[in-house]
Image (cartoon, helix red, strand yellow):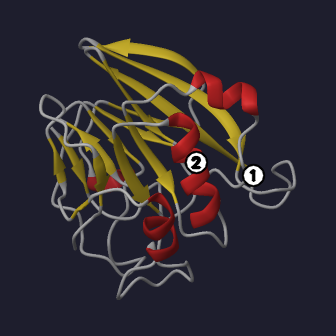
Amino acid sequence: MIRLHGHSMISIGDFLVIDPHDGGSIGLPRPVMRRAEYVFMTHDHYDHNAFQIIESKEKRTGFTGTFSSSGYSIQGIRVNHDRNGGKSRGKTSIYTVKIGNLSFVHMGDIGEYPRESLIKDLAADMLALPVGGVITIDGKEASQLVKEISPSVVIPMHYWVKGHLMPLDPPDEFLNLTGLQVYLENEIDENNLKKGIYLYKP
């Protein structure tokens, strides 16, 4: 089961948590998940690196390369968190997780539209990507990326909702441009995927 915890935090069963936040520092509810085998953070910014809230046997930040455990395979690729070659906000990672025959891609805080060669490598059944602009790609860029990658499931991340303390854009532009079915659900059954967008419900 894949669970959405708001902002960019996503868990895959009890195996993996990506980009944990603590709730209060960004104005969202505190995540209820308490343990996982591994915690992977795309980069070391406060809204993605609250590893203290998760009990785990290993934590990694900005991972690159390939890692395998418990039947899962994770690949990490470093990309820029801004449009200046990483000079403004540094780097972030894209994580591709193989779940049986399915591929889940978490794009971290990617700050520029990815090059064509990278897009070709991002075959994803499930794609989680930032849509709130300001410090990442925006809704328009994210919608174009969805069209190019063509996943079955889309998970918007890193956008403004009521109470959020970060000055991000809401997901409206992204939702309007993609035109896909929207599900207000925080759980995704990878064995019974419904095609469309899964929007986090606080």
Identify the residue at horizontal 22%, vertical 70% (top origin).
Answer: 201
Identify the residue at horizontal 34%, vertical 78% (top origin).
Answer: 24
- Type of the residue with mark 2: His
- Where residue 138 sits, quadrant-wise, is bottom right
For residue 30, above or below residue 32: below
Q: Name the quadrant of the C terminus.
A: bottom left
Identify the residue at the far bottom of this view: 163
> Badge 1 local density, few (<14 within 10 Å), some, or many (20+)?
some
Tell me where residue 135 appears, x and y as whole percent: 66, 67
Q: In front: 76, or 137?
A: 137
Tell me where residue 173 appears, x and y as whole percent: 52, 73
> Badge 2 local density, few (<14 within 10 Å), some, or many (20+)?
many
Identify the residue at horizontal 74%, vertical 59% (top origin).
Answer: 89
Tell me where residue 37 appears, x and y as whole percent: 25, 30
* Observer able to see residue 99: yes
Horizontal side of residue 121 vs 50, given as left or right: right
Residue annotated with mark 1: 90
Q: Name the quadrant of the N terminus.
A: top left
Residue annotated with mark 2: 43
Helix, strand or loop status at disc 2: loop
Mark 2 and mark 1 residues within 8 Å of each other at the beta carbon = yes
Q: CA distance from mark 2 to mark 1?
A: 9 Å
Q: Which of disc 1 and disc 2 is earlier in sequence? A: 2
Tell me where residue 162 appears, x and y as whole percent: 35, 87
- Type of the residue with mark 1: Gly
Helix, strand or loop status at disc 1: loop
Identify the residue at horizontal 45%, vertical 72% (top origin).
Answer: 171
Horizontal side of residue 112 vs 171, given as left or right: right
Q: In front: 138, or 80?
A: 138
Q: In front: 62, or 186?
A: 186
